[in-house]
Image (tube, grey):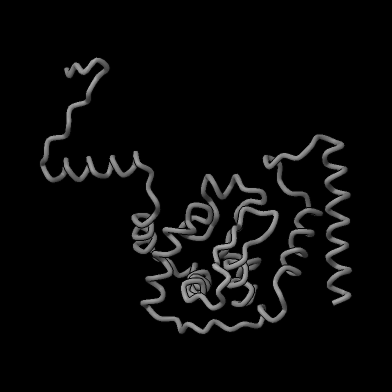
């Protein structure tokens, strides 16, 4: 407990010093890449944030084709806006976060225990764009299924990625465009564009 407090105090002290130096020489901007010191501090903070009892938690949900399909749909609908369907983080929103959404296929994520991944999804990560998705009610089957999804990111096929793309959230304009495409393919006449003043040409 004492060691944990000392580590947290050290992180806070370094953050305070970094904040002072940064603002003194140009302020904060999410357009710049995190410095090596910031990345180190973030890693330490994430490590300290997850309770030791949670790190050793084992996924209670057996992996199956049903779990694989459910977790793909859940990820596509709730997570892909920031993390991309393939977990690369290569989305407009993900790349404009500070720090940027990580490539979860890489060791920095894959080396974490199942318990750590579950805790991060449920509780979020402070000072990042990762929110807490859990309700605080303890065991959540959907979150454990997402842990399975993260573990199998590299196994996604092109067909599965296409399926996920169809499950991604759509804007109103995208939904209207899809509807018009469906009507066109069905041979239905599209409504003529209405111009200002109500005149149709």
Q: Nearer the viewer, residue 29 or 163?
A: 29
Location of residue 174 by image quarter = top left
Location of residue 139 by image quarter = bottom right
Q: Is residue 103 above or below residue 58?
A: above
Residue 59 image point, x, y percent: 54, 82
Instruction: Judge left or right: residue 9 versus residue 144.
Output: right
Q: Is residue 201 above or below residue 141?
A: above
Q: Quadrant of the C terminus?
A: top left
Instruction: Judge left or right: residue 46 versus residue 175.
Output: right
Q: Nearer the viewer, residue 98 or 160?
A: 98
Location of residue 37 by image quarter = bottom right
Residue 184 image point, x, y percent: 16, 40
Residue 47 image point, x, y percent: 73, 69
Residue 146 image point, x, y percent: 49, 70
| Residue at screen point 67% across, 40% down | 31
Q: How many marks?
A: 0
| Residue at screen point 56% across, 65% down | 105
Q: Quadrant of the N terminus?
A: bottom right
| Residue at screen point 84% across, 60% down | 11
Instruction: Judge left or right: residue 29 versus residue 193.
Output: right
| Residue at screen point 46% across, 59% down | 78
């Amino acid at each position: 407990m004492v060691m944990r407090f000392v580590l947290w105090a050290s992180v806070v002290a370094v953050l305070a010093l970094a904040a002072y130096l940064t603002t003194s020489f140009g302020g904060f901007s999410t357009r710049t890449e995190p410095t090596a010191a910031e990345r180190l501090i973030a890693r330490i903070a994430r490590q300290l944030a997850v309770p030791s009892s949670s790190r050793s938690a084992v996924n209670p949900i057996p992996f199956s084709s049903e779990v694989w399909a459910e977790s793909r749909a859940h990820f596509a609908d709730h997570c892909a806006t920031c993390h991309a369907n393939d977990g690369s983080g290569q989305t407009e929103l993900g790349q404009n976060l500070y720090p940027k959404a990580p490539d979860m296929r890489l060791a920095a994520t894959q080396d974490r225990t199942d318990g750590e991944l579950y805790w991060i999804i449920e509780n979020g990560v402070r000072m990042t764009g990762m929110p807490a998705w859990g309700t605080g009610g303890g065991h959540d089957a959907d979150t454990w299924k997402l842990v399975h999804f993260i573990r199998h990111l590299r196994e996604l096929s092109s067909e599965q990625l296409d399926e996920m793309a169809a499950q991604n959230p759509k804007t109103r304009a995208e939904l209207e465009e899809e509807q018009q495409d469906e009507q066109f393919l069905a041979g239905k006449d599209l409504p003529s564009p209405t111009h200002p003043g109500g005149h149709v040409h």
